[in-house]
Image (cartoon, rainbow, N blue to C red):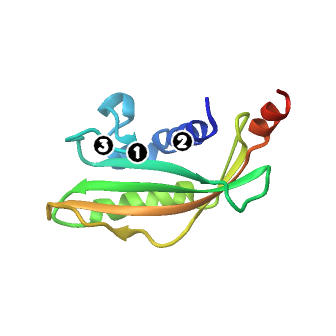
């Protein structure tokens, strides 16, 4: 498993394993079906759903560490923003100042980069919020593998 895949998997497990988040989303992934999608959601995914991505920014960082950007978008279908805001609140509680560890990346620290913002959609009933997080992670295991060659 590569570093980005490991990060996304651990974040995915943190979000989908949370009982409060499961309630807000209408059930667990097992009960309801997939609701946290990597990069792009399936066409016509069931609302509400989440889309997330992680982008590593290696330039300008230390050899053993890398900065990155984690973004998660909340998609709901409603006349009001209430559901989207409730989901945003819980995601911030789960991810802001979150510290993850793994044998693949050693550690990853996430923090909220700014306020979530409403994103335009082509349907007034579809509400979309984007939450930007910064990340700093240690590439220790990846570097050990490179040096062991």
Indicate which disc, 1 or 2, sits on the residue closer to the N terminus. 2
For the residues labelled 3 and 2, say whether their Cβ atoms are less than 8 Å apart: no
- Compared with 48, 130 (above or below) is below
Residue at 75% in and 52% down? 65
Tag in front: 1 or 2: 1
Residue 104 at what x, y percent from top left?
70, 35
Q: Quadrant of the N terminus?
A: top right
What mark, if any, has residue 39 been given in the picture?
1
Give the secondary structure at mark 3.
loop
Label 3 to label 2: alpha-carbon separation: 22 Å
Mark 2 nearby-residue class (10 Å; few <14, some 14–19, many ≥20): some
Q: Using the numbered discs, state the Cα–Cα distance from disc 1 to disc 3 in whole angstroms.
A: 21 Å
Quarter where residue 62 is shown: bottom right
In the picture of the structure, the residue carrying the numbered disc 2 is 8
Residue that badge 3 annotates: 26
> Total number of numbered labels?
3
Name the spot of residue 54 as percent of width and height, x first: 52, 49
Above-or-below relation of 128 to 44: below
Task: Identify the image quadrant of the C terminus.
Answer: top right
Choose the circle earlier in sequence order: 3 or 2: 2
Residue 139 screen position, x and y as percent: 74, 44
**Residue 82 position in % (x across, y down):** 28, 65
Residue at x 70% of width, y 54% of height: 66
């Amino acid at each position: 498993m590569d570093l980005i895949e490991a990060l996304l998997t651990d974040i995915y497990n943190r979000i989908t394993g949370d009982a409060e988040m499961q309630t807000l989303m209408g059930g667990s992934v097992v009960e309801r079906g997939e609701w946290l999608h990597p990069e792009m959601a399936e066409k016509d995914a069931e609302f509400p759903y989440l889309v997330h991505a992680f982008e590593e920014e290696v330039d300008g960082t230390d050899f053993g560490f890398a900065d990155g950007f984690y973004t998660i978008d909340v998609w709901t279908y409603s006349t009001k923003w209430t559901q989207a805001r409730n989901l945003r609140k819980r995601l911030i509680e789960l991810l802001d100042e979150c510290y993850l560890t793994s044998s693949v990346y050693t550690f990853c620290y996430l923090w909220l980069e700014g306020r979530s913002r409403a994103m335009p959609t082509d349907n007034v009933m579809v509400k979309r919020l984007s939450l930007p997080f910064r990340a700093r992670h240690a590439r220790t295991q990846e570097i050990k593998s490179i040096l062991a060659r």
